[in-house]
Amino acid sequence: MTSAARKPTPEQRQILAPEIENLLWGLFGPNDRPFFDRSDIAPIALDEFVQCDEVFEETFRFLDALTRIWNRRCPGRPLKPCAQDRQAKEIATPMVLPDLSETPVSKRQESGADDELTPAADANIEETSVMPLPRPPDTPTSGSAQGRPGQVSPASTAPAKHREPRASFQLPNGKVGVDYAARIEGRDAEGRPVRIRDVRMPEGLGLSFDPDSGELRGIPALDGDHRLPLSWSLDEKTRYSGECLLIVNPDPKSLWKVIEPPDGSLYLKPHADRRLLTGRGFRIAAASRRGRSHEHAGTFRDDDFFIGHDAQTQWSLILVADGAGSARYSREGARLAVASAGAQLSEALAGEMSARMNAALHGWEADPEGVAQAMGAEFHSLFHKAGTLAVQSIEQEARSAGAEVRDYATTLLAAAVKRQDSETFLATFWMGDGAIAAYGPRGKVRLMGTPDGGEFAGQTRFLDRAALADQAFARRIGIGRYADLTAVMLMTDGVSDPRFETDNGLNDPAKWDGLWDDIAPLLASPEPDRSLVDWLHFFSPGHHDDRTLALLW
């Protein structure tokens, strides 16, 4: 015999709505064996689902179908819904629904989709519904007299079961790896504050709940949206269930990929480089590391460096270069620049120029201004020649590779250093961004020029023939002689930008003190150059370029 799926009448909807909603809530708990897991469902979404007309109608059809099956299998013993008052000894009398032949029914096509409502005409369809229905509270039992004063009709229906109160909860966002301590703020539907009694934490989240303070504490270990099941109360007696959303943001460092450059790439280059030299009473270390932006893109390190020391003349050299990120072969341009310029400076300071400069330094005390001017002219010529040789080597490589010279664009910073007792003489050349500084004693710094992007041209200037021919070339040369100097430092903008941010920051001695405090313990380690390579991987939001630092201390 075929059964018909019926829509509930307005009377049935009014009477059964509370019981059907209770039935649906039971599927999600709280009870010993809920059917559905509600841990990832927001309470407000579940509430809207339970009260949805479509859900009510489908549940009604389900109950109606169960009742039909029961009455076929157990005729004469109709099902009776329990009274809503669980303490009552009497239950509602079964109520027979109207004849199906007078009630619109909804059939399903073979496709399974809902049809339009059509009159029942199939002779095989049962003509009466046997789904019992609790009567409205004021409806007397069939065949009984009207209720007398003080008499309670046995078929009267108790008021609908009171729905569990709701409350909303809030927590500030956390971040993986960062200490977290926050109080769960909860209020009920009337805006009254509630007390959080317990919170169930996901395994591995890294947080714990303190019921006395109502706080979550710890170091989050899992990022994502975490819905935390909890219990709460208003009167310290009755507990209710709820949940609070905690959003844990990922550690930004974890979002960066580390990708190797394509196999067979031109101008292979290691992702990190380092070197250490020791002289009489001082040391020179250089470290260079591929930045996170290059790691993420699977490209090479564009920075490079050169350090050297002549034990006979006691002249030391430090050079760093930063290849332009927009130039496809700038990594080779940076390497050629420091190698060519470094070789030229080393050769000159090991020859006759060294003798002239040593003699000039001995007369510094007597005529500091005159000696500084003469030495400045010598180093102007030397740095110009070194820069020219660097440009020529880049041009030659571009011709050999069939590329453009601009494909090898690079900056170049250089320093020639001579130590004499407690005095340090310093001659520098500054082309591009980054920084060259004579630091110390504490609280004191002398910048040996201005990074391009400040005084020069409004953007980074790269080493080329136009820059060498510029009338302002002399302003790129710095000369100084300092007592009690702590260190001479050269760095690319991958270090200077996150540490100093602006040109004003570069002139702030406190920021240089902070940098020195960070690296001084590394310089005291057995392998300071290796320690510097590791340090260069520090994380600074928005600053992910290659980093190179070279210094004499």
Image (spheres, grey):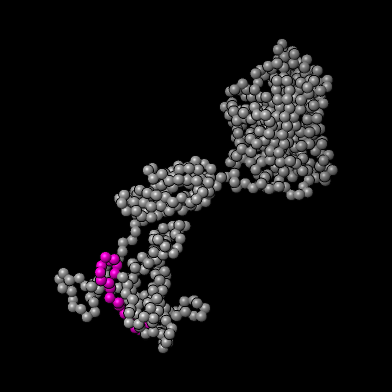
Of the pair 425 and 79, the residue shown nearer to us: 79
Examine the residues drawn in magenta and state their main secondary structure.
loop
Tell me where residue 237 appears, x and y as whole percent: 31, 51
Please report the residue visible at 76 percent of the width from the left and 27 percent of the height from the top: 308
Query: Looking at the image, can residue 413 be seen?
Result: no
Question: Can you tell which quarter of the image residue 101 is in?
Answer: bottom left
Please report the residue visible at 61 percent of the width from the left and 21 percent of the height from the top: 441
Q: Is residue 242 above or below residue 35?
A: above
Query: Looking at the image, can residue 147 be seen?
Result: yes
Q: Residue furthest top?
A: 366
Q: Is residue 382 above or below residue 177?
A: above
Question: Can you tell which quarter of the image residue 132 is in?
Answer: bottom left
Please report the residue visible at 76 percent of the width from the left and 39 percent of the height from the top: 333
Tell me where residue 126 appears, x and y as whole percent: 39, 84
Of the pair 84 and 323, the residue shown nearer to us: 84
Please report the bounds of the magenta region as a residue range.
83-104
Q: Is residue 98 magenta?
A: yes
Where the N terminus falls, by quadrant? bottom left
Tell me where residue 84 appears, x and y as whole percent: 29, 67
Q: Is residue 121 magenta?
A: no
Please report the residue visible at 36 percent of the width from the left and 65 percent of the height from the top: 22
Where the C terminus falls, by quadrant? top right
Tell me where residue 471 appears, x and y as whole percent: 74, 29
Q: Residue furthest bottom?
A: 123
Q: Is residue 114 above or below residue 343?
A: below
